[in-house]
Image (cartoon, coloured by chain):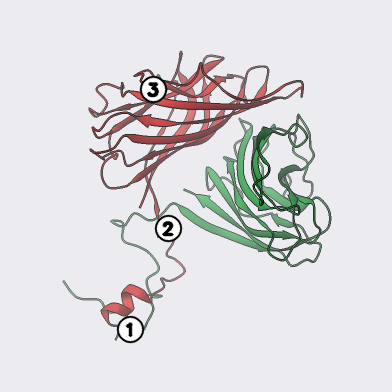
């Protein structure tokens, strides 16, 4: 018979057991002409890192920004003060222009405004954006709250564009909700999945 | 409550987890290992509507020929043709081992504009015994038949001229057909060794 230490250090499950890794799906939200996509539960001290995956975010209105903001009151207000950086890279489908630049008009300096994480998303029928946002230790009441995103999408012209955004919520209050929305108009379609990393 | 004991040093009789245990979200689907045979590293099964994101982990990719690159392409016909039209971006950072040269720049020679060519994700790779490339490629929702197919990569390689290159490629396969296969190739010569693992993210 196995001892306790056998079970702890020397075991393997049968072939039917999958999904014992460190990434746990917590919840997902799917847009259907939605003004906002929000996560108001599941963000707590359980995990030190939360990952949001964006799958084919499609705006109703052409050329708007896809944005994020945080809440310390479970979604009553999304207005956490943030200081951020924004790096943009694009390439026209026509091949006529490229960019790799820091964008001073897209970052925030101690602002409570929404943070754009992709700029100018196209609403063509096949246009969308996908990517990832990491939020670290949102429940800490000692430190600021770091986040890092990388989003790839089709923007108007059309252009293949990628944004690298990072910063921190400059608060020692626990962040317990996150909201995504367009700068104007609805999110017509798309899914956001939230994971916890244990 | 009755106690349950493992009857040997494994738990192989357990083939499913209780509902109360929320499992991880990464599932290893398959692994391709290079053997210097001239065969590209391709995945022609397992890429379908099961997952909204697929992740390829490239581990110690070592080309047989120095000063070569690592590239990939997509297929919509199960691997018969790897020729999906793509518009992409490519930027990199690098530093020479002696500290004399550092760069952060966009590379116009390594992006694509509505091209069916292979997309580079590493370049100037070395063929020295200890030189190789490792990194990650994300592919989002490949089976979608409404939207284009986004991807993004982040790789690092030890180059033939003693640089550390970190390379970021991203873009979209400009097709509304489902992507169902992918191939990884060296720009010249074989992939001598290395492993690529395909994961689905649920």
The structure residue drawn at horizontal position 73% and vertical position 24%, both measured from the top left corner, is A93
- Give the chain letter at badge 3: A
**How many numbered discs sit on the rendered protein?**
3
The reply, left or right, for residue B150 in relation to residue B126 is: left
**Which residue matches tag 2?**
A19
- Outermost residue on the left side: it is B1
Q: Check whether the beta carbons of the residues at disc 3 and disc 1 lie within 8 A of each other.
A: no
The structure residue drawn at horizontal position 56% and vertical position 15%, both measured from the top left corner, is A63
**Which residue matches tag 3?**
A36
SS for dot 2: loop
Residue B28, above or below A13: above
**Which residue matches tag 1?**
B7
Q: Residues within 10 Å of mark 1 (few under 14, many from 20)?
A: few
Question: Residue B153: horizontal and vertical position, in percent?
Answer: 61, 43
Q: Nearer the viewer, residue B5 or B194?
A: B194
SS for dot 1: loop
The structure residue drawn at horizontal position 68% and vertical position 17%, both measured from the top left corner, is A157
Residue B90, above or below A95: below
- Outermost residue on the right side: it is B188
Q: Nearer the viewer, residue B166 or B200?
A: B166
Residue B172 visible to the viewer: no
SS for dot 3: strand
Question: Residue A98: horizontal and vertical position, in percent?
Answer: 70, 24
Q: For the residues marked 1 and 2, what is the alpha-carbon distance in whole angstroms?
A: 23 Å
Question: Residue A143: horizontal and vertical position, in percent?
Answer: 28, 37
Q: Which chain is red?
A: A
Question: Residue A35: horizontal and vertical position, in percent?
Answer: 40, 19
The reply, left or right, for residue A146 in relation to residue A77 is: right
Q: Nearer the viewer, residue B155 or B5?
A: B155
Residue B195, above or below A181: below
- Give the chain letter at badge 2: A
């Amino acid at each position: 018979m196995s001892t306790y230490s056998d079970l702890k250090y020397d075991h393997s499950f049968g072939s039917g057991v999958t999904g014992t890794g460190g990434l746990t799906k917590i919840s997902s939200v799917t847009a259907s002409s939605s003004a906002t996509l929000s996560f108001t539960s599941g963000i707590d001290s359980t995990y030190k890192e939360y990952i949001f995956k964006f799958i084919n975010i499609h705006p109703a209105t052409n050329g708007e920004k896809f944005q994020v903001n945080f809440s310390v009151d479970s979604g009553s207000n999304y207005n956490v003060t943030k200081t951020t950086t924004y790096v943009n890279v694009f390439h026209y489908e026509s091949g006529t222009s490229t960019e790799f630049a820091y964008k001073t008009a897209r970052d925030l300096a101690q602002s409570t405004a929404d943070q754009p994480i992709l700029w100018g998303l196209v609403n063509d029928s096949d246009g969308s954006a996908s990517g990832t946002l990491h939020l670290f230790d949102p429940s800490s009441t000692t430190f600021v709250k770091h986040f890092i995103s990388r989003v790839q999408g089709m923007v108007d012209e059309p252009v293949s564009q990628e944004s690298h955004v990072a910063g921190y919520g400059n608060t020692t209050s626990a962040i317990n909700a996150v909201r995504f929305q367009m700068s104007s108009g609805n999110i017509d379609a798309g899914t956001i999945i939230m994971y916890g990393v244990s | 409550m009755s106690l349950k004991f493992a009857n040997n040093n494994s738990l192989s009789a357990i083939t499913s987890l209780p509902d109360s245990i929320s499992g991880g979200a990464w599932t290893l689907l398959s692994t391709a290992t290079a053997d210097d045979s001239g065969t590209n590293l391709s995945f022609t099964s397992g890429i379908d509507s099961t997952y909204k994101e697929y992740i390829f982990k490239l581990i110690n990719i070592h080309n047989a020929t120095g000063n070569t690159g690592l590239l990939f392409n997509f297929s919509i016909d199960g691997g018969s043709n790897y020729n999906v039209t793509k518009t992409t971006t490519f930027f990199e950072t690098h530093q020479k081992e002696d500290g004399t040269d550092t760069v952060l720049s966009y590379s116009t020679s390594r992006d694509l504009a509505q091209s069916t060519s292979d997309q580079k994700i590493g370049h100037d790779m070395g063929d020295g015994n200890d030189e190789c490339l490792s990194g990650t490629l994300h592919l989002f929702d490949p089976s979608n038949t409404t939207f284009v197919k986004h991807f993004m990569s982040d790789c690092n390689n030890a180059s033939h001229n003693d640089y550390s290159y970190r390379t970021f490629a991203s873009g979209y396969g400009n097709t509304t057909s489902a992507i169902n296969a992918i191939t990884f190739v060296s720009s010249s010569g074989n992939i001598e060794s290395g492993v690529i693992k395909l994961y689905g993210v649920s």
